Image (cartoon, grey):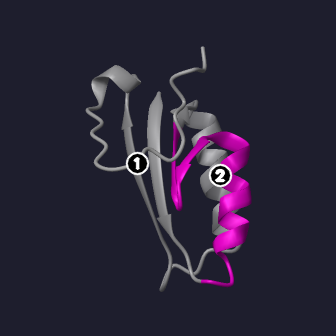
């Protein structure tokens, strides 16, 4: 499945989430990642984040679909990280 993951974590936890997401998805900008990921790997990522996430302050938003083509993507301004070169 294709996923866009956006997170908003407190200052003390934001670097942990950044490092975790980089293991599973492609960094787009600031707290935004995208890429192909299996449901099992996505659950694994969420279980790992649960270890340090403060559910009263932090949030994760996940947009998912069968493929990148099933999601419309519009960029206004500079694209931070173009992943179109990946096969």
Q: Which residues are magenta?
A: 11-34
Is residue 66 visible in the rendered image? The answer is no
Q: Residues within 10 Å of mark 1 (few under 14, many from 20)?
A: few
Residue at image x 31%, y 43%? 75
Image coordinates for residue 44, horizontal then vertical, percent: 67, 47
Nearest the camera: 28 or 76?
76
Residue at image x 64%, y 73%? 14
Compared across the picture, whether 29 is left or right of 21 comes to left
Residue that numbered label 2 is attached to: 21
Compared across the picture, whether 87 is left or right of 3 comes to right
Nearest the camera: 59 or 75?
75
The picture quadrant where one finds residue 47 is: bottom right
Residue 78 has which mark? 1
Quote the CA–CA distance across marks 2 and 1: 22 Å
Q: Is residue 38 above or below residue 77?
A: above
Q: Secondary structure at mark 2?
A: helix
């Amino acid at each position: 499945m294709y996923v866009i993951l956006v997170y908003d974590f407190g200052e003390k936890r934001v670097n942990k989430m950044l490092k975790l997401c980089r293991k599973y998805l492609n960094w787009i900008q600031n707290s935004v990642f995208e890429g192909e990921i299996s449901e099992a790997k996505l659950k694994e990522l969420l279980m790992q984040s649960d270890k340090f996430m403060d559910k009263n302050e932090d949030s994760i938003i996940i947009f998912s679909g069968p493929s990148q083509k099933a999601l419309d993507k519009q960029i206004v301004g500079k694209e931070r990280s173009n992943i179109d070169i990946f096969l």
